[in-house]
Image (cartoon, grey):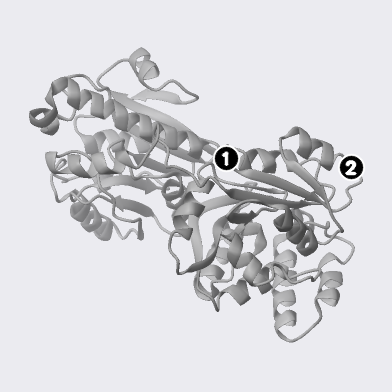
Amino acid sequence: MTHKLIVFTRYPEAGKTKTRLIPELGGEGAADLSRELIGYALKMAEGVAKHPQTHVSLFFTGCDEAGARTLAPGDYSYREQEGADLGSRMSAAFTATFGDGYERAVIMGTDCPELNEGAVLAAFAKLADADLVVGPAEDGGYYLLGLKAPRPELFHGIEWGSGSVFASTMAAARNLGLSVATLETLRDVDRPEDLAYYRGWRGARTDGVVPAPSAISVIIPALNEAERIGAAVASARVEEKAEVIVVDGGSSDNTVAVADAAGARVLASEPHRARQMNAGARAANGDIFLFLHADTLLPSDYAQAVAGALTDERVAIGAFTLALDGDSPLNRVTEAAVRFRCRVSSLPYGDQALFLRADTFRAVGGFTDMPLMEDFELVRRLKNRGRVEILQQPVVSSSRRMERLGVIRSTVINFAIVAAYHLGVSPERLARWYRGGTAEVGE
């Protein structure tokens, strides 16, 4: 595992926790609030831990390891914080983590209920290009800090607990010559004035989970994907209310049986991804359609993220950030290239799990019946109807084709096909070029 999420927390002991809130809540009430916030943070961290090459550690203080395990039972590693102040404790945690061989490390607190899985994964992604990533808090501190090497000097001379922590950290980064990426500014719950905000935020939740749409249909075209379809279906069924439809294009292996056993509704269709996805959409009952490739896994909070994006009427279609499985540094280069392409052109591809309102899909006639580039064509048409939203949350897609062909050859082929499509080469000819006897149908 190359990524480590470090959760920093204090055992919620009455009278010693959330001391600035004791005048409002009392000692027990402040401790109860702290315990509640820790619960939200750990639930989110569990989602992060499901991603490849990512592990979660709980760095605790105010108790022994048995107390930490009682507070946060789960598949974590546990370590006591070491140091005289918050800065020295964070520095020691980073040093220990990199000493264990991790390549990227992110520390998060447990005071920011708005912090979600997508933001943490985005922090890891930003460390591909930056030395330091920071999530600033409204009170002048930060709720997250990420590094890819120990930087003990970054924690010197900071007045911890003050409203100048973020500014002082940024100044220290500049003095050290570090490149810095920042996340969205969020709100910690530390002060009496934060309580009204938190109560309003909590009132919009049920059992610590943002309500998901009751009608989302995940449509998965498949052909000879028995090895991968079960995992794809499972990632979609994390949302209990989602309708999961696998549209099989005539598989000769056990794809249908595996998909059925995983809990999907399975349909048969003529082969070719556009036809399969259109068939799935015709049978779907959801108000939102999400089209997922059979070798791709959704993040655990995908339904909430999709619903949130589509509450904005200006959004016509959306997709997720792309992550590739496997440890190859070239995969990270490819991921960065995809992020750049999406920023510049707002043209995500189908392996990024496209989603849109069902009535929008029907209004534009669905996917064009073509053997290749159907995803590109749909997004290009919908750009004329509204905004293309790229979510921070990543989907994890198989890198099998690049492993077989090589990253450079695969990238050149993809670029050439897009360029040839713009020049008017027929999709049928492009499909023959793309497959060329080497690519599997459905890749």
Residue 98 pos. (x, y %): 43, 38
In the rendered image, which quarter contains the C terminus? bottom right
Name the one closer to the observer, 400 or 215.
215
Residue 213, above or below 318: above
Image coordinates for residue 280, horizontal then vertical, percent: 74, 54
Q: Which mark is residue 241?
A: 1
Q: In the image, is residue 404 above or below residue 196?
A: below
Residue in view at x 53 percent, y 41 percent: 300
Q: Nearer the viewer, mark 1 or mark 2?
A: 1
Residue 225 to residue 436: above or below: above
Instruction: Give the quadrant of the N terminus.
Output: top right
Q: CA distance from mark 1 to mark 2?
A: 29 Å
149 relative to 269 in the view: left or right: left
- Asked whether residue 402 is in view, the answer is no
Q: Which residue is mark 2?
A: 253
**Identity of the amino acid at label 2?**
Asp
